[in-house]
Amino acid sequence: MKEYSADLIRNIGFIAHAEVGKTSLAEAILFAAGETTRLGSVEEGNTISDCGPDEIKRKISISTSLLHCEWKKHKINLLDTPGYSDFIGEVKGALRVVDTGLVLLSGLTGVEVMTEQVWGFAKEYGISRFIFINKLDKEHAAFDQALATAKEAFGGGVLPLQFPVNEGVGFDTVVDLLLMKCLKFKKDRSGTAQISDIPADLKSKADGLREKLIEAAAESDDELLEIYFDKGTLTEEEFNRGLKHGIAQGSVFPVLCGSAGENMGVHQLLGALVDLAPSPLDRPGPVAKNVDTGEEVPLKCDPTASPNLFIFKTISEAHVGELSLFRVYSGVLKSGADLFNPNRDHGEKIGQIYLLNGKTRKEVGNVPCGDLGAVVKLKDSHTGDTLCDRKSSVVLPEIAFPVPVIRTAVIPKSKGDEERISSGLASLHEEDPTFLVHYDPELKQTIISGQGELHLAIIINRLKEKFGVDVTVEEPRIPYRETIQAASEKQYRHKKQTGGRGQFGEVFIRIEHSDRGEGFEFVNKITGGVIPTKFIPSVEKGIVEAMESGVLGGYPVVDLQVTLFDGKYHPVDSSDIAFKLAGLFAFKGAMKEAKPVLLEPIYDVEVTVPEEYMGDVMGDISSRRGKILGMDSEGKFQLIRAQVPLAELYKYSTSLRSMTAGRGIHRRKFSHYEIVPHEIADRIIAEAEKMKKES
């Protein structure tokens, strides 16, 4: 395989809302570059990137695919990412290692909710952004409207390099503002175009848009701005240099257009990526941290430096094992190299190295800095890990994956499968860090959580397909808490005579409620030695044990203060166990008289939806006992902030998607505990009593 120096490499991430044609564009690019001999389609299930059985079956992208091709002697690495919010972690991982995000918009809908979210990720990572307005061959396609939504959402730096002449069903022609020519594509999907002069009726529009590009190029550099003010224009070389600089620094977001399905505009997109997108040398390298000293170490894309690479994705393949996808940030990764994983403090021997096009692998001897590749069968290295030279050990920042928005409980369909299920779920987590699993001893359930119901359905299916075990899903129990609303005092004497040495301990306690979230405080106010000091910890231990199971539904007790203020002891019969039991039963009795109440977890919820769905979404939140805290505009979308009980959020992502035609997304995180309304508390307590009797 030919090797490419860093200046000839372009790392591009395809990011967008679902169903705007990312996979079709990737297919067209590979076809245009000669990597494939035919244009596959998502509908037929024969594309290079959507090659997993789940993807073929559902006709959607689920995992990020690593692809590559050559164009004009440059190597272009493509990461085709999913567009559904259930798989947003795949986007986060891909954008961590690319230099440019190619944001696709549909000519029918323009900017969507997920477009805004992935744009934000690209901005967070500081990478350049191109925009490709796709599907201009479809009925009702409207380039200007889609462009307007991008300008509204992303600012004045959104500037077209092309615009269509005849969008819609007959689309085949664009005006190219770099060439200042008209391009008419052949309708044979070859991607070739006939070049002609711009029609007279479009010349004025083209000149105006070209002038805006020249201004943006000049404004990207002080020297070019002086030349522009002095001469009123820029040379072609100055224009291209300024435009490339503006793209690299994030002040210019160039817009191209076409139809991926018909292979129109793809050659021009490839040319723009080669000529204008930054190479790994055009961007500052990541800042690592020295493991020994803690000092920050900027990594330079230098082939003579020691190798440093970052694993951004893990794929588990049958008969192959784990495939780790990586980017080399410095040095050259060679097969057979001995490297060190500072995240897990162990060495790794590099085996076979591959370049990927979906499932197709080409073995190579090495991968230079700035490039992407894959390595098989690492001993214990996973997504987010750094591999480096042991002598100059540094660690790169891990990927900040989004927190889960849905949780459910799973139980084995067959007894004896528990260990295989646990092992399988742990393996699936290594492959997909946005999927989390843990056994909750309080709830006595195995809880899995992720980014959406579809996400978890695919995880469960993979558990069955890969590990041969099946589970059923049930609603996860809610971690309720109990507390008190009033103060009370209680005396309890524990006295037991068994013929030999007896048991004796007497305590007087006062319990009072604390502010929400303050937890438990034990106050010792014993004076005069009425209870010997050595027995005081035993009283506290008994109270703490009693708090593990409250008096209403058997839930943990929180947010109160207990004061031990009096008591009695016997010089022979008193013991630690006697005072522990006295404390336990005194607390149980006091709590029953202190107006106990049930608490439920409340979550902060942020919902982003198109404005037309705002009323329905707000009404639904209210029906879930939610409180609307406020609203903010984000372009043409509305951000609704609310607080909702966890008990009302089961399968909320599915309901939201149904309510908003798939265009709404939400985030949530724990906020605090609140008192459960009386009528609901009665039902919860009754259910808890029923479960206790059945167990």
Image (cartoon, rainbow, N blue to C red):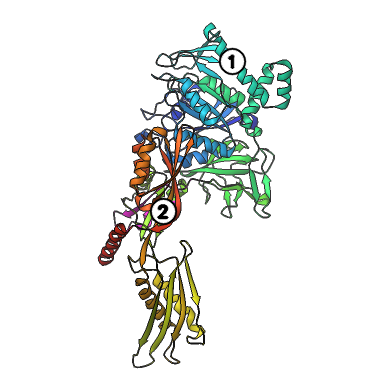
Task: Indicate the quadrant where residue 217 lies.
Answer: top right
The residue that disc 1 covers is 208
Residue 272 in percent (x, y) is at 57, 23
The residue that disc 2 covers is 602
Residue 129 in percent (x, y) is at 56, 30
Q: Find the residue positioned furthest to the front.
A: 486
Name the amino acid, label 2.
Ile
Name the amino acid, label 1.
Gly
**The one of 100 and 523 positioned closer to us in this rendering:** 523
Query: Vertically, is 116 above or below 223?
Result: below
Give the total of numbered labels. Answer: 2
Give the extent of the magenta segment.
401-426
Question: Neighbour class for label 1 at 10 Å: few (<14), some, many (≥20)?
Answer: few
Residue 132 in percent (x, y) is at 50, 25
Q: Residue at x 49, y 32 (%)?
A: 635
Q: Quadrant of the C terminus?
A: bottom left
Instruction: Answer whether residue 360 is magenta in the image.
Output: no
Q: With 495 as the anchor, is 604 left or right in this view?
A: right
The kind of secondary structure element at disc 2 is strand
Marks 2/1: CA distance? 54 Å
